[in-house]
Image (cartoon, rainbow, N blue to C red):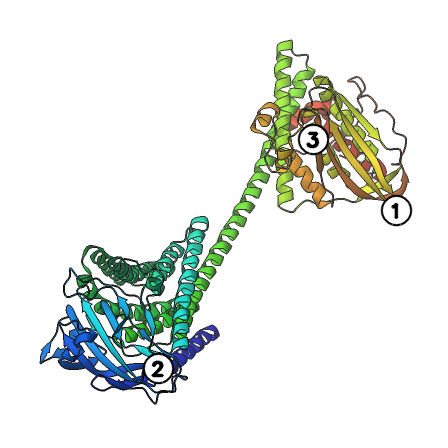
Amino acid sequence: MKNLYHHFFVLLLVIGSSFFVNKAAAYDSTININKGVADLRNVNFTDKAVMLKGTCAFAWQQLLTPANADRFDSYTSFPQLWNNTVVNGKTITAAGYATYGFTLLLSHNRKPLAMTMPMVYCSYRLFINGEEAAVNGNPGIDRETYSAKWIPVTVNLPENADTVQLMLQIANFSHYKGGANLSMEIGESKALFLQKERIISGDFLLAGCLFMGGLFFLGLYFFGTRDKATLYFSLFCMLYSYRLVGSSAYSLHAVFPNLNWEFTVRMEYLSLFGGVFLFFQYIRNLYPKDIYEPLVKLVMLICGLLCIITVATPATLFTQLLNSFLFIVFGCIAYLIFVFIKAYMQKRIAAGYALTSVAVLLLMQLFSELEYFGVVMPSRLLMFGGHIMFFFFQSLILSFRFSYALKQSKMLAEQGLQAKSEFLSTMSHEIRTPLNSVIGMSNLMLRNNPRPDQKEQLDVLQFSARNLLNIVNDILDYNKIEAGKISFEVIETNLPDILSNIVAGAKNAAAEKGIEIELKLDEGVQHYVLGDPTRLSQVMHNLIGNAVKFTHDGGVTVELSVLEKKQDTITLLFSVKDTGIGIAKEKQQLIFEEFTQADSSTSRSFGGTGLGLTITKKILNLQGSKLQLDSEPGKGATFYFVQNFKLTTKKLMVREEAAAMPDKSNQPLNGANILLVEDNHINILVAKTFLEAGELPLMWQKMVRKLLINWILTGTRWY
């Protein structure tokens, strides 16, 4: 409610200021004309410009010139449309031609004066002291000799003349209105010309800002949320921008004087009818639950029909529709206030700003209509500010709407990401369970001396199952990293032992491809360090596995080097160098992206998910390290990273060669009591067979070894 009070305070401030300024403009600057004579000798033009109002000489259906100025035959009110003018007891028509005559009495001691001619219906020629001073179109005596034009003109008055004779020819055969409904403005020359430039500049500035704002919102629609409210508001802004320069002061006509009048007047009316149509479409999509749909559709139908009439009929017909339509517009704006109040009460998005903006629009429309009917002359500064306020508040509305939609999309995306993560975790675990059975059963079958053809098929089965298991493990690791659930241990770690084990495990794969794999350990590594052996093993396993996979000739070199050693810390360089296919420079960043390899043929030739390097990079980043790459196509690649560790006082033991696996006759588990808990019958069968044979797969050997060590240390019997 506090925000609503704030909006209404701003609105009341605008209303009060506008009333004050418009009152001054309407009443304090008018000079009376008595039978064509205006006495301006006592006017202080330093403070203000003046407008003429009263009676002047008039000649209907005559285009008089200074040579026959004595042929004026009557007097008439000025300014006044011909539609309301009575001459010799008869109301004249809007179509026709006439001449007005004025005499201005000026003082000797004055600064140079100028006169601004307003737009008249629909062409004129102005003579000052017998000389042609300004012309708009061609005021002819019939449609063939006549042409219409609306261009704002400011001309200087003679400097040394006490009396100035004005003769104004006006003709109209294009509009349903005829004659002059606005008066000339007289003031200091410098001030009037400066005012003209300011009006044109201000109109184009406002129109340009509005048009660019429309383009911005149009781009926001196409590249954003596809919100129809944003689309219709953008189209409204671009169409309404024409009204700011193509009506009222007609600044567009001043800059481009050769524009066709028929085109510009149709655009003026289309921008009004079409603007109301688009604005109601905007409101219809902005607050669909708060409008009365039949009424909105009726308004849009009327606007659509008026647009068609404007395009298809002559100006003398469609210009007659304006007065009635202005009352419709006024009623529509009043209805929109009701809609926005309702939206505010329902706590719709930015409804307070919407209510304030439409109230400002109502105020501006009121002043525009009063100006159109010649009641007041609104302050252009305040009209400019009113337009700025209206479009600023409307932009705020769409900004809040876009922000709300963005938050909703973010929330839905986060929910989708969480659901995806849960799905991947569940499915990966579910897939891994039968995979363990497949790998275990294939191992059992290989132990039973299969035929050569069966052995070949079992090898393929086991190879494929292990590849699938690696993929599942990668997905699980990636999912855990993305969810922020990864954690790191800080325990005593034997780095040479870890690297030796990984290299030893990769030798079989390297031997099958006919390549060498070598490990180089710096002698400066003499102590255990504090780190996470599991994550380091995962990183090095990925790098070494990739190096072996992508190398056909030559070999792979794994190296651990000391870069810096202090009393409590050590900085080490881990590198894996291969002589494989290499990676082009433009694709070296690409391979670190999720599910990506250097090119599409790589995944077909070598397999894999494309997650290995991504996981490796993320693990290192989380530990404050960075994975780097040097490579050339066809010459191999070197992956390396630098990591800092805290040193411990525990020294490394001289590593002996790994003992050979015990054969079947040597059963290390003989006599041990083992309790196996498993809910999968296939896994029970596999484990039972291995246990009865005294043999375990490597992953189970590690688990049992850990449990046995725990049993020995604690003295507890393990069942």
Q: Is residue 707 visible?
A: no
For marks 3 and 2 on the same chain, the one whose residue lies earlier in the sequence: 2
Mark 2 is on which residue type? Asn
Q: Position of residue 221 (x, y in %)?
A: 42, 52
Q: Which residue is mark 3?
A: 631
Q: Which residue is mark 1?
A: 568
Q: Secondary structure at mark 1?
A: loop
Contact check, label 1 and label 2, Cβ < 8 Å: no
Residue at image position (25%, 73%) is 127
Q: Position of residue 507 (x, y in %)?
A: 75, 22
For marks 1 and 2 on the same chain, the one whose residue lies earlier in the sequence: 2
- Quadrant housing the C terminus: top right
Q: Which residue is mark 2?
A: 160
**Which one is nearer the viewer's eye here, 44 or 550?**
44
461 w.r.t. 155: above or below: above
Q: Position of residue 554 (x, y in %)?
A: 74, 20
Mark 1 is on which residue type? Asp
Q: Quadrant of residue 519?
A: top right
